[in-house]
Image (spheres, grey):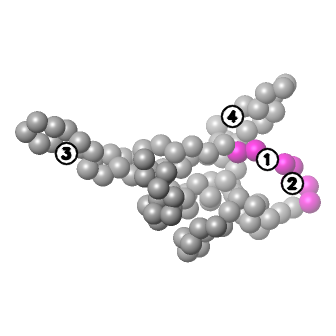
Amino acid sequence: MTKVEGFKDRFDLNFENFKVDKKPKWNRFWIVNDKATLKKTDNAVYFDKINMEVKTEEMHFTGKKLKGDGTEDPDALKFSEFFSAHYDEFAQESPLLKE
């Protein structure tokens, strides 16, 4: 488990707002670069700072396929926004996120 203060996993977020009539939900998450700053030297161009962002999309069964429709589940959005805001902290714990 992470040591990032204030972190709540998807399980905890789902049950904070649990309702008996709530249907199972599937969400996908992916990481994108939000903003990147380029620097230039005499013979090179490089990324000086890259801000990473975690995106999410709600998934639904359509026939036999799971498809996204562009909507965001509120709990999944909380998770992705928190992860984005604390991305560098998570990367300190998991070097794979630095690559």
Query: Is 57 placed above or below 12 here?
Result: above
Side of 42 relative to 3 (left or right): left
* Residue at numbered disc 3: 39
Q: What stretch is highlighted in magenta?
A: 20-27
- Residue 69, image x and y in percent? 69, 34
- Of the residues under marks 4 and 2, which one precedes in the sequence? 2
Neighbour tally class for label 1: few under 14, some 14-19, many 20 plus, Cα within 10 Å? few
The amino acid beneath tag 4 is Asp
Cα separation, mark 1 vs mark 4, equals: 13 Å
SS at mark 4 in the image: loop
| Quadrant including the N terminus | bottom right
SS at mark 2 in the image: loop
The amino acid beneath tag 1 is Lys
- As for residue 23 lying within the magenta part, the answer is yes
The amino acid beneath tag 2 is Lys
Nearer to us of marks 3 and 2 is: 3
Side of 8 relative to 54 (left or right): right
Q: Residue furthest top?
A: 63
Cα separation, mark 4 vs mark 2, equals: 19 Å
Nearer to us of marks 3 and 1 is: 3
Q: Do the residues labelled 3 and 1 touch (CB within 8 Å)?
A: no
